[in-house]
Image (spheres, grey):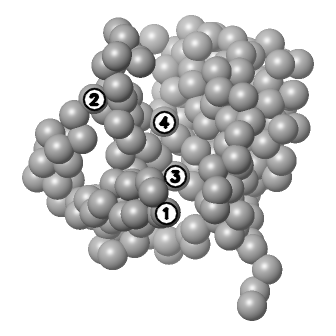
């Protein structure tokens, strides 16, 4: 059995939190061509997004009674070596912790953090390692993340400290940078000042 493999700084999962699972399922299956299957882990049911047979994300219920006023929203999960260390770095760098570190058995450990300008992302350490990296994106797959921020220089410092992301200029467009995890040649996405 191979040891789990990790690529810290890579976005490895996405979840849609929605008050209407069935409506969201119909919409995304039609628009993106996804297959969304309900899977059971013990007593818990989870709506798994699949593209070409590979799991790429999930749908989570957003209860109107518990999450009053919170609209449907996506959360991206970034692989980190240690969730608790990422949370400590978030606080030191001036960010907020929206969901304290918690175990999600048997899958892994997570927390949800927010940068000083309000950008939200989840930090994740999977028990079985990170999913494999596709050689090239397929139709319907996730492949880019985008942060619009009021303070790109502070955002660069925050994400470098918390997630180890570097940034490089993006062509000639002012205010846009690519995040490059761990100085690798692949890109994670870009940020832009409004």
The answer to whether residue 186 is left or right of residue 41 is right
Residue at image position (71%, 40%) is: 102
Residue 68's image quarter?
A: top left
Q: Earlier in the sequence, mark 4 or mark 3?
A: 3
Is residue 166 among the parts visible in the rendering?
no
SS state under label 1:
loop
Q: CA distance from mark 1 to mark 2?
A: 23 Å
Residue 186 location in percent, x, y?
62, 57
Q: Camera-side residue: 12 or 111?
A: 111
Q: Which of the pair 62/145 is nearer the observer? A: 62
Alpha carbon separation for disc pair 4 and 2:
15 Å
Q: Which residue is mark 4?
A: 75
The nearer-to-camera label among 1 and 2 is 1
Describe the element under mark 4 as helix, strand or loop. Answer: strand
**Front position in the image: 190 or 30:** 30
Task: Reply above or below: 151 against 75.
Answer: above
């Amino acid at each position: 059995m191979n040891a789990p493999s990790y690529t810290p700084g890579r976005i490895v999962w996405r979840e849609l939190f929605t008050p209407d699972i069935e409506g969201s399922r119909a919409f995304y299956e039609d628009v993106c061509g996804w297959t969304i299957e309900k899977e059971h882990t013990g007593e818990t049911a989870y709506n798994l997004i699949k593209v070409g047979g590979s799991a790429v994300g999930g749908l989570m219920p957003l209860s109107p009674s518990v999450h009053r006023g919170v609209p449907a929203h996506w959360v991206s999960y970034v692989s980190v070596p240690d969730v608790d260390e990422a949370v400590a770095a978030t606080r030191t760098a001036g960010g907020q912790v929206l969901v304290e570190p918690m175990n999600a058995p048997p899958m892994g450990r997570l927390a949800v953090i927010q940068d000083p300008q309000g950008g939200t992302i989840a930090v994740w350490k999977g028990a079985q390692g990170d999913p494999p990296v596709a050689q090239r994106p397929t139709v319907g797959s996730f492949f880019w993340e985008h942060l619009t921020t009021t303070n790109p220089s502070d955002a660069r410092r925050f994400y470098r400290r918390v997630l180890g992301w570097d940034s490089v200029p993006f062509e000639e467009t002012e205010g846009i940078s690519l995040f490059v995890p761990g100085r690798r040649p692949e890109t994670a996405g870009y940020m832009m000042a409004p």
